[in-house]
Image: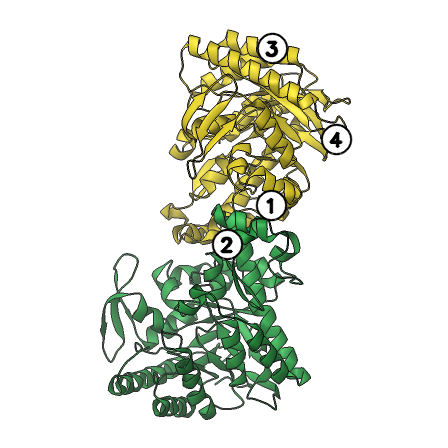
Chain colours: A yellow, B green
Amino acid sequence: MSSSSPFTLLKTDSSSKARAGLLHTRRGDVETPVFMPVGTQATVKAVSPDELRTMGARIILSNTYHLHVRPGEKVIEELGGLHRFMGWDRSILTDSGGFQVFSLSKLRRITEEGVHFQNHLDGTPTFIGPETSMQIQRDLGSDVVMAFDECPPFPCTYEEAEKSLALTTRWEKRSREWWRTQPEEGRPLLFGIVQGSSFGDLRERSARSLVEIGFDGYAVGGVSVGEPEPEMMKAVESSVPFLPEASPRYAMGLGTPPQLVEMVARGVDMFDCVLPTRIARNGTAFTAKGTLNLKNAPFTRDPGPIEEGCTCPACTTFSRAYLRHLVKAEEILGLRLVTLHNLHFYLSLMRKIRESILDGNFAEFRREFVSGYRVHNAVEKDEKLEG
Amino acid sequence: MSSSSPFTLLKTDSSSKARAGLLHTRRGDVETPVFMPVGTQATVKAVSPDELRTMGARIILSNTYHLHVRPGEKVIEELGGLHRFMGWDRSILTDSGGFQVFSLSKLRRITEEGVHFQNHLDGTPTFIGPETSMQIQRDLGSDVVMAFDECPPFPCTYEEAEKSLALTTRWEKRSREWWRTQPEEGRPLLFGIVQGSSFGDLRERSARSLVEIGFDGYAVGGVSVGEPEPEMMKAVESSVPFLPEASPRYAMGLGTPPQLVEMVARGVDMFDCVLPTRIARNGTAFTAKGTLNLKNAPFTRDPGPIEEGCTCPACTTFSRAYLRHLVKAEEILGLRLVTLHNLHFYLSLMRKIRESILDGNFAEFRREFVSGYRVHNAVEKDEKLEG
């Protein structure tokens, strides 16, 4: 772990495990709970770094696997690192590549060393193990590095989950060891990832092992991989009690707005999710009452904004009718504006959650938000979120 | 014509017919020569109104045919007109719909009244004649309205061109008559369109007829429809001498950067073209030396901007290497940034042309620019520009 603490816990809610805190990265402080927009290929889809800054994003996520495959971390390193490459001077968290190796690549062969696979673009034979993953994330210049893990499919048997977890634990330990060889000065944070599928005792075992190894923060992985929502909640509930109060906690690849609120209530500090950017590209916008599909006919002559009172660039200038027209006409400006609205919605939701925790009224906020939000969109329910 | 003159001629170049002037629309003055970014479906593709304002665009073009088909001018009128609909408070010129009726629609039947056709989206039977075109452009709230014309294919026989021109002239006269029925206060400008294909005497006849009818400005149409560049130049050269010095002149759907310079030298004041936005979406960027295809391998590790010294948002922040990555990865931010660069290039070229006319060194600017620009890109040469 870094010599100074990577996390300051400012307040814990009295009605739940919700916390407000500060994550300290080498590029500044990040207020938590926090949502990290996903910038898979060194860009948050359709959005410029300036737009991200304007809407108050302090940290984004980028994908190790994708950047390794294209353009390659050595190209990015030569051009001054990922921050300079993409024009983003705030914090970046990179995932380990594990999830994508298992979900995107072809002809995988898992050994104790790591994973041999053919990449999804041109089938080039590639290998990523814990040390490779660490090296790629270092070359990219990530501020928060994720340990390399195996993500078992859902559902899987107890035996499969247990075997996979044992391998993940050995890989995470090797990630930690590699990371220790790096100069302490300016070293990024390293997070471990709790696995164990839907088995509570494996989640506990995983969390305990990681804490023993010692990381700057702890993620819950293997969630939002197709399991029902109660399973997702259980995976987090079975992990959090065994993670240190003093460390940041991150639930990977989640989720819908009410899921985020519920996860915060269960003690999670950090989130990332493709949902706001992905469904925007289909013309679906978030509001406090649930999603709107802007393609729907009733919006044809609707002069109002996506959501009354919203201060995003889409809502302050453009009508639902115009956005509907753009989406129907497949104009890029349409998905740009809906993407901006959705990211603004997520970032603003996290700010409201944080404020309510600090003000001591999170219980009320949670009750009102979750009961006011209606999940009525098939896209939203069925979306496989991670990656 | 409007009661006050729609155009102020500030200076005519001594070495050519190039002019610097001011076009006066009801939404303000537009410095000429001017390039009008194309916003076919009520948006300049991939670009926001704020971005257009920032790069100094004073007037854009939008397409009557497209907006009539979707979402319909009545929807736009109900929502406060095209300016309010798309969030653009500067001038808008709308084309007549003629070109698109002939290039996009199916099962056309031309009568004296106008054109019966099935639209390109869902085949709905539709009719547009001169009065319909005027009414649609009025409902949209256009600041510069184009008379309804027929655009004959290239090549066509003299007889076809002559017959088509006669019909166009009758249609333009009817456009003018309809327009006179509108209240004079706040009436938009109305431009006539010179046709006549590649036949110099027909171009002359067309220009003379339009001047006799009397319009606020005069366009040269039926260019950039597949003809070789010398034919395009000839079409303009055969038209301009018969158009009034005191009126603005507009060459429709042109062109490459050197073509614009050459057209200015032939006395043209206004241009629109899809080239900068269209080829941007293919990763092709304009520079003073010609186009760059950012997909090319040599840019993989190129830390420089698209063009040294360019002040556009792409060049001031991002490297060729990053833009190449975005284009290769088919990321929307890539085509956004290249589109911004290309529009900035066109707008900035027009400003430089104007300055050189006012400073009395257009001849030098023209010689240096045209000789320095190498047309080496097949996309650029083969592109059918209009529409």
Task: Confirm or deny contact between disc 3 and disc 2 (CB under 8 A).
Answer: no
**Mark 2 residue type:** Asn
Residue drawn at the location 45% of the way across and 37% of the way down: A291
Q: How crowded is mark 3: few (under 14 residues within 10 Å), some or many (20 or more)?
A: some
Q: Where does residue A387 sit, x and y in percent of width and height?
A: 49, 31
Mark 2 or mark 4: which is in front? 2
**Mark 1 residue type:** Thr
Kindly identify which residue carries mark 4.
Answer: A186
Kindly identify which residue carries mark 3.
Answer: A209
Q: Earlier in the sequence, mark 3 or mark 4?
A: 4
Mark on residue B296? 2
Q: Which of marks 1 and 4 is nearer the N terminus?
A: 4
Q: To which chain does the residue with label 2 belong?
A: B
Task: Confirm or deny contact between disc 1 and disc 4 (CB under 8 A).
Answer: no
Residue B16 in the image: above or below residue A23 = below
Residue B326 in the image: above or below residue A2 = below
Q: To which chain does the residue with label 3 belong?
A: A
